[in-house]
Image (cartoon, rainbow, N blue to C red):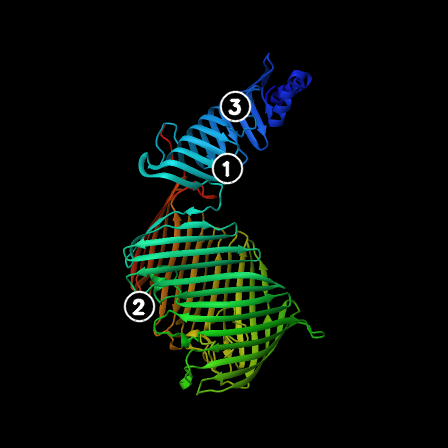
Amino acid sequence: MRGRGRTLLPGMLVALVLTLVPALAPVAARAQGAANLIADRIKIEADGTRLVASGNVEVFYDDTRLSAARITYDATSDRLRIEGPVFIAGPDGSIFTAEAARIDPTLQSGVLRSARLVLDRQLQLAANQIDRVEGRYTQLHGVAVTSCTVCATGEAPLWELRARRIVHDQEARQLWFDDAHLRIAGVPVFWLPRLRLPDPTLERATGFLSPAIRSNSNLGVGLRLPYFIRLGDARDLTLTPWLSASTSTLEARYRQAYLRGALQIDAAISRDDQEDDLRGYLFARGAFAAGRDWTLRFDLETASDDAYLLDYGYTDIDRLTSELTADRVRDRDLVQLSFAQYSTLRDGETDSTLPPLLADAHWESRLTPPGLGGTLTLGADLQAHYRYSDTALDGAGRDVTRAGLSADWRRQALFGPGLVVEAQLAFALDHYAVDQDDTIGDATRASWAAATTLRYPLIRRGAQAVHVVEPVVMLAWSDTTDTAVRNEDSTSAEFDEANLLALSRFPGEDAVETGRRAAIGLAWTRRGDDGWQSRLSFGRILRDTAQPGYSAASGLDGRVSDWLLAWQVTAPRGLGVDGRLVVDDGLDVVKSEARAFWRSDRVDLNAGYLFLQADPLEGRADDVSEWTFDTIYRIDEVWSVGLDARVDAAQSEPIEAGLGIGWRNECVAVDLSVSRRFTSSINVEPSTEFGLSVELLGFSAGRAGAGASARCAD
């Protein structure tokens, strides 16, 4: 008989023998209290002080398991002699292998000869001798450490750390090296008298992170060496010096998690040859649950000059937004409070034209009117914006405060074989208080609207797909008492499938659509059994009179709007395209945007196209036509290539381009990148940047190599 039954029977007999022999009772108590032993053969020698187990020996103590060919327990010295091959699996996931060992019965202290320790199934430590002390410390003598594949032929791994001694603190999960040197393919390249590294099971530890070499045509070649500081279980700070011939920069990132919120601060300060003064930036953001369903958020953005963020590659945003908000969202009501400050980084734009300061308070509640049905939405707004200028000439310093009340009622009903009818009524009352503007004064405006929307969805089940065709018509009318309000929040309107059936296409509150109008549209949706899904929709707006306030490039000006066409297609293997097109009756394109994506095991692809017709009202003197492309192609388990580009198709000139090459195996990750920004302005010069980072895998939690393992020669 083989298997577990064979190994358990001798152990049961030994327990019985130890119980029946009074002279061995103390030995039995100590042995059973220290560990449970299972073996093919167990015998007690004549003097009664030694127990010998052989054949498929296994010892269990708490969550530690030991396997060996033979174990001898000496009661006189209270020690275990273990003959290999020896295998020990610890409760923390560590694995010991050795040819022979001497260890105490608790398996917490002892000596292993010609041993190997594996941490978290990735970091290998081979030593001439391993000493375990007090169950916490493991001392390794004559050590070679690597996470690379180690071949039996003696071939040197891609990298390894050699040390005279390593102490592994299992409680602190740290590795302490004495007389350590790094070898690449067996060649020593770097030496340190002392070195401390976290073991792979430690998720957060103070110490250096992987360095990176960065070369910028404007800032020179430099080294970025991040240093992570653990300030507690919920706080940390990362300091990253960046030194080159042209700049001395210190970057910082602070993060803190609270029981009911989170905070992150990113900042940098630089001294370079681009400017005479110190340069820098500070971004801070946080969100906190304040109780009673309130959430507080803040976002702070500031920079020393217009070009700093782009020069150092932190972000390409062209306006800085600092905002403090508080909101409460419940089943039937919504409250939002916000205060924002804007700062422009654009050439030719000043903060006073934005305007820079904006405060807003909004309340909304939804209820069902008795006897009327449907949904009634009541709202109230208080909004104010402030400009820095003190002059009233031509409204250069215009400050405006708006207070508004609104009500919107909607009800939907189904008639006959599937006709869906929706009725809508809306009313708004706004008062504008204007300061420092000699062209306009205060104004009070009332506006009202009514609309009816008819939908008739038609469904057909085919052999391989379901088709839905839905024609829709919306008839609307609205009016207002005052059109002299200065439009500041609705200067750029979009025409898309989301607002085709809206009462107003203006994005803000200052402008209001008036007159009689109709919106017509048709949507076709296909859902295939094979996973293919597609949707195509188009529509336009018809008015009795032209609507002022819309620019020509919006597609909404005139009595009849341009045609809107939108589409989406998704395939079962991660492929998809979507887009939107606005064309006039002459089939000239006014606006268009399209996006294609592909997600697979080997490819991550995003490509896009954008076209905007020139329009002075929207701040575009020339047509805008751009292509964007961003992809990563994984050639195999080791190599990957990334490419991104942005091209000005109208001028046939590149805007940005980048190339990245990655190489990764089970123990090393190498990333090489090159990027070029071709655009220039008053504040920013074109630049080229190179980057190189090399990471030795195995010392970071959750960062085991994902690439292919090296192959050993036969």
CB-based contact (under 8 Å), mark 1 and mark 3? no
- Residue at 43% across / 60% down in the picture? 595
Disc 1 residue type (three-letter): Gln
Quadrant for the N terminus, please.
top right
Pointer 1 or 3: first along the chain = 3
CB-based contact (under 8 Å), mark 2 and mark 3? no
Disc 3 residue type (three-letter): Ala
The residue identified by callout 2 is 681
**Label 2 to label 3: alpha-carbon separation:** 73 Å
Image x and y of residue 215, in percent: 30, 54
Residue 632's place in the image compared with 609, above or below, is above
- Residue at 53% across / 37% down in the picture? 92
The residue identified by callout 3 is 68
Is residue 463 among what the camera can see?
yes
Q: How many marks?
A: 3
Image x and y of residue 364, in percent: 60, 72
CB-based contact (under 8 Å), mark 2 and mark 1? no
Q: Nearer the viewer, residue 428 or 60?
A: 60
**Label 2 to label 1: alpha-carbon separation:** 57 Å
> Mark 2 or mark 1, which is nearer to you?
1
Residue 306's place in the image compared with 434, above or below, is above
The residue identified by callout 1 is 170
